[in-house]
Image (spheres, rainbow, N blue to C red):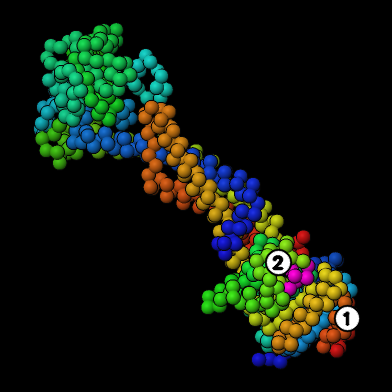
Amino acid sequence: MNKVIIKTENLCKYYNKGQHNEVRAIDKVNIDINRGEFISIIGPSGSGKSTLLHMIGLLDRPTCGKIYFDGKDISNLSDNQITKIRREKVGFVFQQFNLIPLLTALENVELPMTINGHKEIDTKKKAEELLKKVGLGHRLNNRPPQLSGGEKQRVAIARALANDPEIILADEPTGNLDTKTGKEIINLLRRMDKKGFTLAIITHDQRIAKVAEKVINIKDGRIIKEGG
Amino acid sequence: MLDMALRNVFRQKARTALTVLGVMIGIAAVVALGSLSEGLRVQITKNLEQASGIVTVTEKSDQGLFVGMTSSELSQETVDEIMSIDGVRDATPVVYEVGYLDDESLGFGQPTLFESGVNPEDIELFTTEGAILDEGEVLEEGDTDYAMIGYTISEDLDLEVGDIVTVEERDFIIKGVYEEFGDPGLDSGIIIPIEIAQELFERDTYSAVIIYPEDLDEVETLANDIEDSIDGVSAFTTAEFAKQIQGIVDQIGFFTIGIAAISAIVGGLGVMNTMIMSVMERRREIGVLKAIGATNSYVLRMILIESAIISLIGGLIGLGIGYLGSNALSFLTGGQAEGIVTIRLAVYSLVFALFLGIVGGLYPANRASKLSPVEALKYE
């Protein structure tokens, strides 16, 4: 097990590469994220922080540079191999919650486990436990439209934890929530963080950034400041 | 995944129902029309079995027995030659004309009247030894003013023994009526003495010679011998006959089912359209699925299962409606066109429905599976 869970080397994402309207969403970024670390990524809108998060979460491929996940260069892996790593080791929490409206809270949490296809796991039982852990033991069979914003985000967090990931990536998880609920969500994420996995949160909220162990400040696709 | 696919299918109920309807209509048409050609096939096979082991000789024709027989002209010498060939047990010449009853209410284009001239003492050869008299007696030598009729004619024209039937403006007294036999040639037939038939139709030739071989296993050999040794004739055996009719029935079948299949294919396009719409609307969800670890093939399978479900429901309902439609057609045509929904037809039509769903689903499923998760997640 490597101490560094994610390492990027001159990572970049260019759109319309080589043309007059080339956009450098991420430009030669080098970061190390240590196992168990709580980092926050801050920066103005359009600075490239979501693009960075998507790339380190293996949701998007870089145009150039390398990403090492748990010490392994993933640049040359196939889509299916990358999907498998993402499924087993990464959990996502989005600003828009992105729950499947058709499924109940319980089924939404079960879904990543079902997709993962480990038959020996009692997915229903595990989903129930996770939902209890995020404080939604009483909302198991409600569908997303019947849940409040805070509740939806709790379901999303439970879903992100379903396959016991090594890192949770959250893209403005409090962006659609009021201040009080947002604070609760961050506290919940941090409580999870204490259990030993890595947490990276994109945020506008300076107060969240303050409690993070490391803050990466991005502007125009480049890191302008990195520190604790 | 099946459970989720089912829920996705019924998310847009009206749209799914319309798509199902499209497949249903096509499959119902396939089943109804397919059952009619199956019915025709069964009917014909039954008739042929009753007439097995016979060689029918007509004037040389490459149009097959059906068409050949009505235009065939065999001279007395040729008939004598045919009847004296080795291996013939019994033989009888016939004069054969087809016509239409004045009452055209039956509506189908096939001949509704078969007028046959036969030697009275050979009538049993002509009726392939299987027909049973319902009432009256068989024609005898010298019965020049008498005729025998089949079941359908007696029913349709309400005739019985002793009544008068008119052929080519000449009246005949009905001497015998046959029971239903299953072959239109007899059921819709009027049998009169052969010399009277020749007189009526103003001909001194014969349409065909019906031959019973000495050895049933030698039917084909006998037919070949006749064709080889006598110029200008064609000898048909029941097997050949069966092949020809089977060919015609198959063609009718292909044609009708082909037309029905086109409407089913349009239904399949409906499935494709619905799935394209559905994938467009659910882009974000597909992005989420991929973000939480669904592979391209998982998404592909999910969309394919959805379109298969739609088409299979359409196929099942279509099968039911087609079955009812087939019975309704039998009823409306008074049993003339009898539809038979065989297991084979049912299975084929369901497989066809499934095939349409899967082929229709391939394009949208492929598109969905190739969606970039990041792009899909941006979609509002």
Labels 1 & 2 near each other (Cβ < 8 A): no
Under mark 2, the amino acid is: Leu
Residue drawn at (70%, 66%) of the image: A99
Left or right of residue A95, residue B200 in this image = left
Tag 1, which secondary structure?
helix
x, y (%) of residue B307? Answer: 57, 54
x, y (%) of residue B326? Answer: 43, 36
Question: Residue A207 shows which numbered tag?
Answer: 1
The chain identifier of the residue carrying mark 1 reads A
Tag 2, which secondary structure?
loop
x, y (%) of residue A49? Answer: 82, 75
| Span highlighted in magenta in the image | A149-154
Question: Residue A99 shows which numbered tag?
Answer: 2
- Count of picture labels: 2
The chain identifier of the residue carrying mark 2 reads A
Up the image or down, B249 lies above or below A77; here it is above
Q: Which of B69 and A40 is in front in this view?
A: A40
Under mark 1, the amino acid is: Arg
Up the image or down, B366 lies above or below B319; here it is below
Which quarter of the figure has residue B214? top left
